[in-house]
Amino acid sequence: MTRDHIAFPAGFVFGTATAAYQIEGAVNEGGRGESIWDRFSHTPGKVFEGHTGDVACDHYHRYEEDIKLMHELGIPAYRLSISWPRIFPERGKFNQAGIDFYRRVLETLHKYEIEPAVTLYHWDLPQYLQDEGGWANRATVDYFVEYATKVFRELGDLVPKFITHNEPWCASFLSYGLGHHAPGHHDWREAYAAAHHILLSHGKAVEAYRAGGYQGEIGITLNFTWVDAASHRAEDETMSRYADGFFNRWFVEPITQGRYPADMIPFVESQIGKLSYICPGDLDAIAAKVDFLGVNYYTRNVVAADPSAPLGVRMLEPPADRVTAMGWEIHPQSLYRLLNWLQTAYTGDLTLLITENGAAFQDHLVAGEVHDEERIEYIADHLEAAKRFIDEGGPLKGYYLWSFMDNFEWAFGYSKRFGLVYVDYETQDRIVKDSGKWYSEQISYHRSSQTR
Ligand code: FCB
């Protein structure tokens, strides 16, 4: 069984996404410096079976064939990220070879008429900045603006869309509070300060982009987890509001409204004390006008009040027959609900782009094929949810599937496969999965239905 294709309006952009540390490898080539993910992945116990991004998909050497494969599949857009330590391997030291690499990548994309969207920060902070506190240190904001400004100047002519940050929640709370990602700290004061500095660096980079008079668009990508209360009991409803504040509103509200959610502030202050890292003018800077909001959506959470759980919140286990290999509940309706909520509560007419959506499943390579029907179902169901939002007038303009190819899935190493293209890590062979073929047909269907 395979799924019917879905008609989208003319101009809707279909793409795929990746990130530098997850695919490039070549960590010691081209003058690149060390990033926090090199340090973290080489620290025993941090990543599944000690996997690292040292080689990854070897995309640094194979970018031409990878882009050619995208072209063969007819995929018209590609979201990639730039590795900051390739551009500034040491403090204040610019590395031309880093820019040259991305210029070659971008030129190759243009040659094949694939439209790039470039993320400046997809979690690979230079280690020398982490040595001084990383995102918990306000000085990192200025270093980010220096880096962003340089990239705008050097590559701005080839980039129609810039994304300042990928998923500030992960780069702060998951990394400095929960400790699952680099730098692996467990300090909530650091985590909240890091979140604030990341948001501030976004706002200041947007300002620098505007000041440079570039032709392209700029925005930010946030991750969202739709939150449902386990019941209508007041305690569950209250906890679901807190969880929503923690995952979603703490980030989207400052970006779009220039304030942190008022109902969350007493709760956060009870955990970490006064939010003394906020300086006058910061929130105005954070709310700099963007051209779009990038939405990453994978799953939802159902929460219940439980006085014995940390912070009194318990996440319910999703039904075992409706989860991906990450254990994430498959819940496409919540993508529709999320987009509606964003538009109504925060973004209005602002363009929304789904900058990530996709799924890991247990893929089996048999006789040169991967029959990943579950991934096709996942993608088709989420595209239908997105389409419903558009049909009702929602300003959603694009969808970037995570991911183009299997890659280094952070703390899970290579054990989780999200790609449309299977990567044999022994040989670096690329094998298009059935989902890759389906997505390719979806795009040609989209092309032909537009011209009908
Ligand atoms: C997102 C990340 C991306 C990838 C997917 C599965 O949180 O932005 O790099 O790991 O999850």
Image (tube, rainbow, N blue to C red):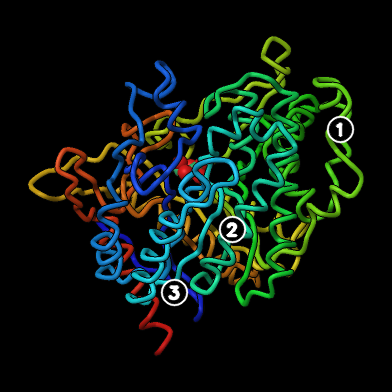
Determine which residue is flagged by label 2. 163
Left or right, 52 with respect to 154, comes to left
Looking at the rendering, which quadrant does residue 6 occupy?
Answer: bottom left
Numbered disc 1: secondary structure? helix
Above or below residue 196? Residue 158 is: below
Residue in the picture at 48% in, 74% down: 8
**What amino acid is labelled 3 in the image?**
Ala
Q: Which mark is residue 7?
A: 3
Tell me which numbered mark, 3 or 1, is placed earlier along the sequence: 3
Give the x, y percent position of residue 195. Answer: 71, 37
Looking at the rendering, which quadrant does residue 409 occupy?
Answer: top left
Is residue 303 visible in the rendered image? The answer is yes
Residue in the picture at 67% in, 37% down: 247
Numbered disc 3: secondary structure? loop
Residue in the picture at 65% in, 68% down: 351
Numbered disc 2: secondary structure? strand
Furthest-right residue in this view? 280
Q: CA distance from mark 2 to mark 1?
A: 28 Å
Name the image quarter holding the C terminus.
Answer: bottom left
Is residue 298 visible in the rendered image? The answer is no
Furthest-left residue in this view? 367
Determine which residue is flagged by label 1. 265
Left or right, 267 with respect to 46, comes to right
**What amino acid is labelled 2 in the image?**
Ile
Marks 3,1: beta carbons within 8 A:
no
Q: CA distance from mark 2 to mark 3?
A: 27 Å
Between residue 135 and residue 365, name the one nearer to us: 135
Question: Of the residues tagged 2 and 3, which is closer to the observer?
Answer: 2
Question: Of the residues tagged 3 and 1, which is closer to the observer?
Answer: 1
Above or below residue 447? Residue 201 is: above
Q: CA distance from mark 3 to mark 1?
A: 43 Å
- The answer to whether the beta carbon of the residue marked 3 is less than 8 Å from any atom of ligand 1 is no
